[in-house]
Image (spheres, rainbow, N blue to C red):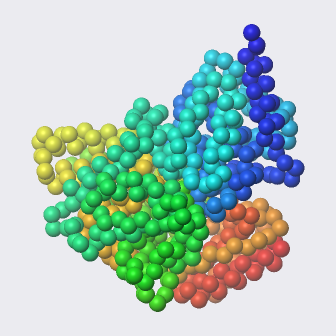
Amino acid sequence: MADPEDEQRAALLVVASLFPVPDGAHFSYGTAGFRAEGSTMAPAVCRAGIVAALRSVKLGGAAVGMVITASHNPVYDNGVKIVDADGGMMSRAWEPFSDALANAPTPDALLQLVLQFAKDEGITLGEGHSAQVLLARDTRPTGEYLLDVATKGINAIVGSVALDMGILTTPQLHWMVRNKNRGLKSSQLDYFTQITESFRHLLELTPDDKGSDKLIEKLIVDGANGIGGLKLEEIKPKLASLDIVVRNSGKEGEGILNERCGADFVQKEKVHPAGFGPNDVGVRCASFDGDADRLVYFRIASPSSTMIDLVDGDKILSLFVLFIREQLDIVNEKDNKVLPTRFGVVQTAYANGASTEFLKNLGLEVVFTSTGVKYLHEKALEYDIGIYFEANGHGTVLFSDEFVSRLESLTSKFSSKAAGSTRHEAALRLLATTQLINQAVGDALSGMLLVEAILQHKGWSLQNWSDLYTDLPSKQLKVKVKDRTCIVTTDAERKVFQPSGLQELIDREVGNYSQGRCFVRPSGTEDVVRVYAEASTAEAANSLAKSVAQVVERILG
Ligand SMILES: CC(=O)N[C@H]1[C@@H](OP(=O)(O)O)O[C@H](CO)[C@@H](O)[C@@H]1O
Ligand SMILES: [Mg+2]
């Protein structure tokens, strides 16, 4: 019989030689996993499979996830992201190993890296353990091939099982991993049932004098020609209270993934997506990105222009904050703190300054982290209720286990002693919210349903929502430089630390503008430096961004 250790070594050497890293290629596990042109991704995806399987072994066989997607990027790109056992992003502590493994130049180098890492992490390879990795992919043409490559990587860790969950939105897979490890129902059907039922439940709790206004029923959704539109079509019959029209739905022949459509396009370009036009003026519209983990809303303002009124992640965050705080205050009214109330709001430097001011004026604690949901999520976990959003529409609401269990006992206490009371209803709304909103990661489908339920609850149109505050005009630019890693930032990326002197030059430019704010940072997903500027007028924001971009070009070449 073969020695299990030899068997393990042989399996790794074989798989590494199947997908060698070409000369000159370099992979980096950036803000959102590995991403590149789909046809070049096999080595990184295979090695990510090895990492995911090792992660599962390390966590005693708990399910870990892998999603093959490049989100809002062009259809020819692809990528891979590892989902940790709690349903969140892979622990950052494992990123350096993932990077090193993805770039291991030879099969033997790969083997040595795995053996050393396993030793450092106390992982026994070869026998006596189990590992399971749940896999999903989006609709990209290279997806099926890369999923097969990922499976080969997973299988190279002896004792691992790869489970193909099919074509899913990214947040669906995160949800499945989280639920599975909590011993909860975790199939796609369970996901659909949970979000549609909790949505229906929230609508049933709409105050009698609100809702069912014909004007606010119609909703047009831009599915980015991706998986989100397809899944929405699937659950639409269960959302009969909404009149939903799906455009760019992902159905064959309707259009190309993310091409002039999707949440990233809409938020960055501030124009309506392809497939929308003058007939849609004034209607409430939503847009998903290609893997449906981002959501923004918009409205076409005039038949003669492609411009939109954008309702971005910051405003979704503000709406969620208002609703949840309102319900929490009702529940806590008498015996204050019957529910724990540590309430945290997490944003990044890209949050519009007007949103931060709005939230602070509500008396809330607003904290900032670096760009990338892994940072925001981690921070939000520190609270009883942690709400985070990136301006681009990625975000969710996290309720601590303690909060949910107190809420559960409270609702059952109310149902026997104060059924139908205002406090009972508010507690039920909060409970339905914890069920509806995806606790693992930002989710366009579930986020959209929560937005819709809140608008119904408040009897609000998109205009009412948009009027919460007025965004400060802003502008984003990208600058190509020789080496973007020369820029080192501090203070949640709001200040440049290196090269020295650059921050002073930015400050000098900002000083020329009323309500001016500007920062620069190296992108974690593209080979560019991003410049963000805000000022009191659009012209001023454009001009501030442009002058700072020129400063960056001059200093970094
Ligand atoms: C300004 C911006 O939108 N940045 C995006 C983008 O990251 P960069 O590191 O800026 O390239 O992609 C990330 C992953 O999708 C997302 O989390 C982030 O918000
Ligand atoms: Mg995405």
Among all residues in the image, which is located at the extreme top?
Answer: 1
Kindly identify the residue that appears in the image at 82 percent across and 36 percent down: 17
**Percent position of residue 233, x then y:** 40, 57
Residue 220's place in the image compared with 233, above or below, is below
Residue 486: x percent and y percent?
79, 63
Is residue 335 in view?
yes
- x then y, percent, for residue 169: 50, 51
Q: Position of residue 56 (x, y in %)?
A: 60, 31
Left or right: residue 114 compared with residue 468: right
Residue 320 figure quarter: bottom left
How many numbered marks, from 0 up? 0
Q: Can residue 258 be seen here? A: no
Horizontally, residue 298 falls left or right of residue 518, namely left
Horizontal side, residue 195 vs residue 94: left or right? left
Image quadrant occupied by the C terminus: bottom right
Residue sitting farthest toward the front: 253
Q: Using the image, determine if residue 97 lies above or below residue 352.
A: above
Residues 7 and 442: in front is: 7
Q: Quadrant of the N terminus?
A: top right
Q: Residue at x 79, y 25 (%)?
A: 10
Furthest toward the right, the residue is: 23
Q: Residue at x 74, y 23 (%)?
A: 8
| x 70%, y 83%: residue | 547
